[in-house]
Image (cartoon, rainbow, N blue to C red):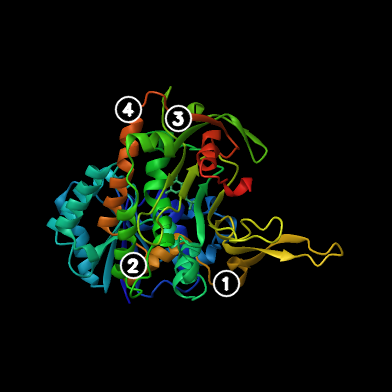
Amino acid sequence: MSFDLVFFGGTGDLTWRKLMPALFQAFRHGKLPPGGRILAVARDERSDAEYRQFIRERFPEVDSAKRPSDEEFARFAELLHYRRMDLSQPEHYAGLKQWIDARGADTAVLYLATSPYLFPVVCAQLGAAGLNGPKVRVVLEKPLGHDLASAQEINRVVRAAFAEQQAFRIDHYLGKPAVQNLMALRFGNALFEPLWRRESIANIQITLAEGLGVGTRGDYYDTTGALRDMIQNHALQLLTMIAMEPPSTNDADAIRDEKLKVLRSLKPFTPESVARDVVRGQYKAGTVGGEAVCGYLDEVKVPAGSHCETFVALRTEVQNWRWAGVPFYLRTGKRLAGRHAQIVVNFREVPHPIFPGSARANKLVIKLQPEDGLELHLLAAKGSAQGELLAPVSLDLDFDKAFASERVGAYERLLMDAIAGRLNLFVRSDEQEQAWRWVEPILKAWEADPNGPRPYAAGTWGPPASSAMVARDGCTWDEEQ
Ligand code: BG6
């Protein structure tokens, strides 16, 4: 299947840091369909050769195992082209259309890796230039709005030019192998489904922790914060996949319909429940991985006295028959104890414990990062001379090891899906809007609260109030167990 893949924002960070390396990996693995052209579009004048050099020079900044040799890069570079475009000029879109039409590939994937404020103008111009025919797909990179109204406005302009089936909204967490595995675990196996409900599950914890700070992105981050940056999208997407009902097929809309139902079932926040069930924090100076680091307010491009949250922990419920009363705890933050993303499903205690210590023996840990795997925790007899001593053991599945040769990165997977037209791992507009509808009361409550976020030392698990919040339910976060 021949394709043209066009990156608007072709010289931006996302393109050279994530997208080009992902494409190169697909190329190296022989997964890139033959007959492809990759076109980068940006404002300044460059030749194809200059653009190839620009990308080549930046490749060393990515993971060393993924770096191409000169010979490999030269073969990959033959696919790369460059075109100067002023995104406000209709004739530049007409020129792009000619370039695409002249070859008539099977599909054209237009990836908006630009600043989101350009989405409306680019979509409108693409529509006006006729670059929205049935062979065209548009890929939209987050942030998709900063609240419900702005997300609706983006969707309105996208819809004016493209059908929903042509719109591929990226949430790169959906491209992570562990997330796809969650679908396989739940709907490819009969084992867990009978247990996957309130009768057997005590609580679910989703943690997306990062050791890194905001780096050089202080200006972007300060207008975003952890709730918009990680909870509204990545954490909620994980929650939907944990909580959704079995879809009737593996088709994109069957899956997305079920995810949407979960988002609609989330308990709505009120100002009172925000005060009780949401903790926001901001990192102060501390030590991460043995290295002393500064506080958020001392990061570059962060305004003095900012109240931007770099940590959020919250408690919610999915209000339906399967999940009524089961707490879902979500937590994310920068400069926490390390890079650590996982979902923990804590099962209930045995109804009548006959062994000491058998309370809360079972949990399933779905590990996303840094490793990708599954751990099932059980209580077992040690078989020691003292007789009845029990000890926790875990069944460990390391998918990185089991499927090493086939595991691909999130962007590689999502780019290949966009080229092939598979929408399963992309977010539909109604899901995205519902997620904004749910987080908005939190944003409003914070705006009205002069206190700002709670401090936490870099390198810890966030403010103590986060542990106190789960302790109210008689729970602890996984690392405290
Ligand atoms: C992005 C956020 O969506 O996800 C970043 O904007 C964050 O702030 C990143 O660092 C985390 O992604 P990953 O794949 O490294 O966990």
Q: Residues within 10 Å of mark 1 (few under 14, many from 20)?
A: few
Residue annotated with mark 4: 448
Pointer 4 or 3: first along the chain? 4
Pointer 2 or 1: first along the chain? 2
Q: Which amino acid type is marked by label 2?
A: Ile
Whether residue 147 is visible, yes or no, is yes
**Residue at x 33%, y 42% (from the top left corner):** 269
**Residue at x 42%, y 52% (from the top left corner):** 325
Circle 1/circle 3 CB separation < 8 Å: no
Q: Residue furthest right?
A: 385
Q: Which amino acid type is marked by label 1?
A: Phe
Residue annotated with mark 2: 255
Q: Marks 2 and 4, how far apart in space?
A: 37 Å
Q: Marks 4 and 3, how far apart in space?
A: 13 Å
**Residue at x 64%, y 66% (from the top left corner):** 396
Q: Where, by quadrant of the figure, is residue 268 drawn?
A: top left
Residue annotated with mark 3: 453
Residue annotated with mark 1: 403
Task: Please state which of the two labelled residues, at mark 4 or mark 1, is closer to the viewer.
Answer: 4
Pointer 4 or 1: first along the chain? 1
Instruction: In this rendered view, identify the residue nearer to me: 439 or 220.
Output: 439
Q: Where, by quadrant of the figure, is residue 424 drawn?
A: bottom left
Q: Could you say where residue 478 lies in the image, as x and y percent from the top left?
A: 59, 49
Q: Residues within 10 Å of mark 4 (few under 14, many from 20)?
A: few
Whether residue 54 is visible, yes or no, is no
SS at mark 4 in the image: loop
SS at mark 3 in the image: loop
Circle 2/circle 3 CB separation < 8 Å: no
Q: Which amino acid type is marked by label 3?
A: Pro
Task: Please state which of the two labelled residues, at mark 1 or mark 3, is closer to the viewer.
Answer: 3
